[in-house]
Image: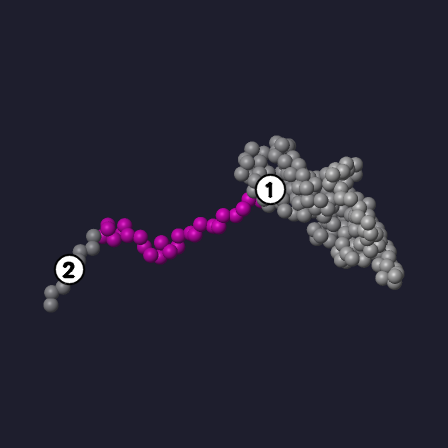
Amino acid sequence: MTYACVSWDVPAVQALPEPDKAEARPVPAATQEPDDDELLRRIGESDEGAFRMLVERHVDRAFALALRILDNRADADDVVQDSLLKVWTHRARWECGRAKFSTWLYRVVTNRCIDLRRRPRNEDVDAVGEVADGQPDAVTAMHRSEVSELLDAAMNRLPDQQRIAIILSYHESMSNAEIADVMDTTVSAVESLLKRARQQLRKLLRRSENDIRQALTED
């Protein structure tokens, strides 16, 4: 039997990729999203893409916070837009590493919300519905509301600083130290605000409960 003789050219063989070395090639690392400081650095260089990424990262939580404080979607949306726009208009002034961006944003949002709550509101007369005869009074309305509505009503009666502290603590799950940073105060002051807010909420909710019980016993 005759076998075909294959002549391997040595240089050609050496030019072929060695399997072991080919398999050992490093796999490109997964692209990581830049952190806030990196995005702010790029924003300082007028990078609109970095600004959009920063907005997308923080806009939902900022809006949720503003909505809880103001209880008005349109006002909350305005506050968040103004706060985030401030990042772009003052982009050259941001100092990376000086403050955590989310803390700064929450501080701006809460301060703007407080300013808006203290501002006199002029209601549109056409938007206010007529009071119908036999409309339920406040006690009956509370009787028909859910527990969450009672809590919201009680929250709305808290002083602004106490209300902000409660929202940041229970809804945003912030530590007292983080709340102190956002509110630009001390941890002990935050503890005092939370304590007084809880006491006031218990008092208001207890009063509401008594009113409901009284309404149920009336003919």
Q: Residues within 10 Å of mark 1 (few under 14, many from 20)?
A: some
159 left or right, relative to 168: right
- Where's the N terminus, which quadrant? bottom left
Q: Residues within 10 Å of mark 2 (few under 14, many from 20)?
A: few
Q: Residue at x 76, y 46 (%)?
A: 164
Question: Is residue 48 depicted above or below 154 in this figure?
Answer: above
Which element is circle 1 on? helix
**Would residue 56 be visible to someone looking at this image?**
yes
Sequence-earlier tag: 2 or 1: 2
The mark closer to the camera, 2 or 1, is: 1
Which element is circle 2 on? loop
Question: Is residue 125 depicted above or below 71 in this figure?
Answer: above
For the residue marked with disc 1, what is the amino acid?
A: Val
From the top left corner, tell me how far across and down residue 64 is, in percent: 67, 48
- Extreme residue toward the front, this view: 133
**Would residue 189 be visible to someone looking at this image?**
no
Confirm whether the magenta stretch covers residue 144: no
Q: How is the image coloured?
A: one colour
From the top left corner, tell me how far across and down residue 128 is, in percent: 76, 42
The residue that mark 1 highlights is 55
Assess whether mark 1 and mark 2 are in contact (beta carbons under 8 angstroms): no
Residues in magenta, as a range: 10-37
What whole-number distance in Å separates the C-alpha atoms at marks 2 and 1?
Answer: 69 Å
Q: Residue at x 60, y 42 (%)?
A: 55
The residue that mark 2 highlights is 5
